Each structure stands twice: as structure tokens, then as C-alpha cells.
Image (cartoon, rainbow, N blue to C red):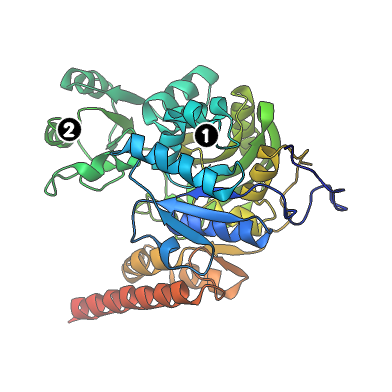
Amino acid sequence: MATQFVTPNEGGNPLRAEPAWPPVVVGGAFQTGLNLMRDLLRRGVRTVAVDHDLTHQGFRSAYGKTHQCPNPDSDGPMWLEFMQRLSNELGQKPVFIPAADVFIMALGRYAPELAAHYLNSPEAAQLQAELCSKETQYALCAKYGYPCPRLAYIQTRTDLDRFLAGARFPCLLKPRSPREWDSLPAGNPAYGRKIVIAETAEELENLYDQLAPHRPQAVAQEVIEGLGNQKRVYISAFGQGGRLLGDCLVKEFRSHPAFTGMPPVVQPIEDDRLTKLCRSFLQELSYRGICEFEFKLDERDGEPRLIEINPRFSGTGDAASYMGIETGWLHYLDAIGYPVVPVAPSHFDFYHIALKIEAAETLPYVWNGTIPWKDFIAPYRRRRAYFDLDWNDRQLTFTTLAVSARYLAGSIWRHLRGLR
């Protein structure tokens, strides 16, 4: 049966889902996926999550229900069967929205088999899977002219030697997808890492030689020069045919280059040049879905260069909801066939804080003077939105506060011992 729509609200899009509208299955129950569940449930969308990792926050949250599923990386056919069965149990074809790379790749791999059970475009799912792999991601950037640092896809030591012939250091190695290095031996320098950085050619060769027996495929790249506060994140949702539904931009507030994952603090900004650069790339691809670009302004020429593309709902992407761009809601409306009216960001005067990351990583750089005290305090004197603090989800909020307090206490203790 086709979805029936009521008259849209004054702004052009409905404020809440109708009771008969399809449900959503979120792929991933880490805090990122949990926040997506929260946003959709607040809009009245019947939402559940799936994850194979029972340690993730969604299994202990007040928001929705999380089902344990097989690991799609290691048990793909069983995961496919589980997802087909879950769709039947929900009673309607749901929309599947990934919030973790493992589920992007699984959706792309099994898109034809899932088409009868989920309201996802197989073509869109396969493009998202291509963008999730560094190998094909950078190839698409080269094809459509998105600026990247000098890099090379490495499969053998010969490939690495060819890259080193003209490389400027420091350089880094990173996996094709973030979880690839999770299976390395525990003593390997790349184990569980998203990147490894080398200051010299000899150091990079040594890192690759330890990596190659286990994971010879990697991306070698020159480091983009400049402090962390030159990092920008573009967050968006696009509809069928690459039609823009909504997008926005944030900048990393903390300035130390050690923050290579999700930034602890970001703030909204406006920059038409950077927004149009990312927007036009996705429109060239006729992209459909949620997408995030992480890039950095190179201090040598001020030009943006890509760090990575995340074709999914992301941790930093949570900031967009507070700017008035609810990418999950916009994507859901488009997926069920609602004629979405594009929206623009409307809130800029706040900081978005990932409290546990902030507590774990920031204070050491305050102690050594890299981050001035005034910069450390600044976000807490303004309006704030939190990635991992929500008083409507008290159990997880108390966990966040306890873990953050432990990180802070440890940092203070190590600092005081160092003063002795």
C-alpha cells in the first residue's frame, strides 16, 4: 500500500510522522546511532536499531529497542536472513539508515536481496558503499575534481616506494575502511587505529612492513599542514537524483592536531565556497542519503583538502540537528516518498561537545599550554549541545558523567605527579 500523506505544515514539511508511516531500522547502536534513534522517535517514527556489539549504548538506552544481529562482516548470509526476518516482524517495509561503516558496506553488498524488504534504493546503497571504501572514495574524488592531498593506494612495497619518491613528510597510512585494522595482532602499531603517522620515509617503510603481512592494502597520504582548528565538517542530506534536502557546516574548535577522530568541540559556521564545493560533488554523483565530509584548510595555500567522506549519520553530524538540519528526518521523508521542501540551517550560536572525548583528550594540552585556558573554558560559557549527555536518557547520562569524571581525575593526577 502506498504511504498516505497529510497536508504539510506551514514550513512545508510535517512536524511528526503519521501513525501509518513506515518504521526505521538504524544500523548501529553506538552513541551515534542512538542519537539518530532519538531524533526519529521524537518525530513520532517507530524506530529500532540493530548491532552485533552488545557493549554499545543502544542496548542500555531509554530510546527505542536494539536487536542483537549477526556481524555482517563475518556472518553476512546470517545477517541478511536476520534483516529480512526483522522486516517481516515489523509488519511494514522499513527504511534502513546506517550509522556505522559496517552496515553501509553490508547494505551495499546485499542491496538487491534487501530491496523486497526495505525502502532503500539499491543504487543509492551501492554508491554509499563505494564512498565508504577509501580505495573507491578517492577514485571518485579524482574523477569529479574534489581536492585531496597527495595520496596513493598501496597494495605492495613497490607501490609504497613509488609514493615515497615524491612525498613530503609527515605522511600517514590509513586503512580502506576504519575497522580493517581492528583484526591486526595486538602488538602491531596499527592495531585498532584509524591512521598511523610517520615523520620520515624510513619510519613509514617500517610501519608498512609490519602491516603488510596482515593487511597489505592501505592508503598512503601526505599530512595536510595546519592546526586542528582548520578542520571543517560538511553535513548533508540529499534526495532522489541528488536533490538537496538540507546541509550545513561546522568547524573544529579545539586546535591540536592530535584530535584525528570525532572532534571534542565544534561550532557552526557559514562558508558558501566550502558548502558549494561539497554540495556540487554529491550532486554530480546524484547522491541520495546522508553524507558527511571531513576536510581541512591547508595552511600552505588555504585550500580545502579531503580527510574522508562518511556516507552515513555521524557523530559530528549530530550537531546538524541542533542547527535545524535533521538529516535523519529529511532522509526518512525522502525515502518514504514525501515531497521534501529543502531546509536551511537556522541556529549558529552554540558549541557541540562530545563530553567523554573532551574529558579524555583535552586537558593534557591545557597543561602544556597548547590549548589556552580561555579556549578551554569558552564553549562552557555559551549555549551548548552535547553528543553524549541527555537527561531524558538518565542511565547513559550518568555513565557519561562518571566516565568523564574518571578521565578528568586521571589527567589531573598525572599533571600533579609531573609537577613533583
Tell me where residue 353 appears, x and y as whole percent.
Answer: 51, 64
Q: Secondary structure at mark 2?
A: helix
- Nearest the eye: 75 or 160: 75
**Which residue is disc 1 drawn over?**
303
Q: State left or right for residue 224 relative to residue 89.
A: left
- Nearest the eye: 120 or 225: 120
Numbered disc in front, either 2 or 1: 2
| Callout 1 amino acid | Glu
Identify which residue is drawn at 27% across, 76% down: 410
Tell me where residue 58 appears, x and y as whole percent.
Answer: 45, 61
Tell me where residue 245 appears, x and y as whole percent.
Answer: 70, 40
Q: Label 2: few (<14), some or many (≥20) within 10 Å?
A: many
**Which residue is disc 2 drawn over?**
208
Residue 420, by quadrant, is bottom left
Q: Which mark is residue 87?
A: none
Position of residue 338 relative to residue 355, above or below, is: above
Identify which residue is drawn at 55% across, 30% down: 115
- Nearest the eye: 115 or 345: 115
Q: CA distance from mark 2 to mark 1?
A: 29 Å
Q: State left or right for residue 6 relative to residue 163.
A: right
Q: Label 1: few (<14), some or many (≥20) within 10 Å?
A: few
Tell me where residue 293 appears, x and y as whole percent.
Answer: 52, 39
Identify which residue is drawn at 52% across, 34% down: 303
Q: Is residue 257 something one can see in this rendering?
A: yes
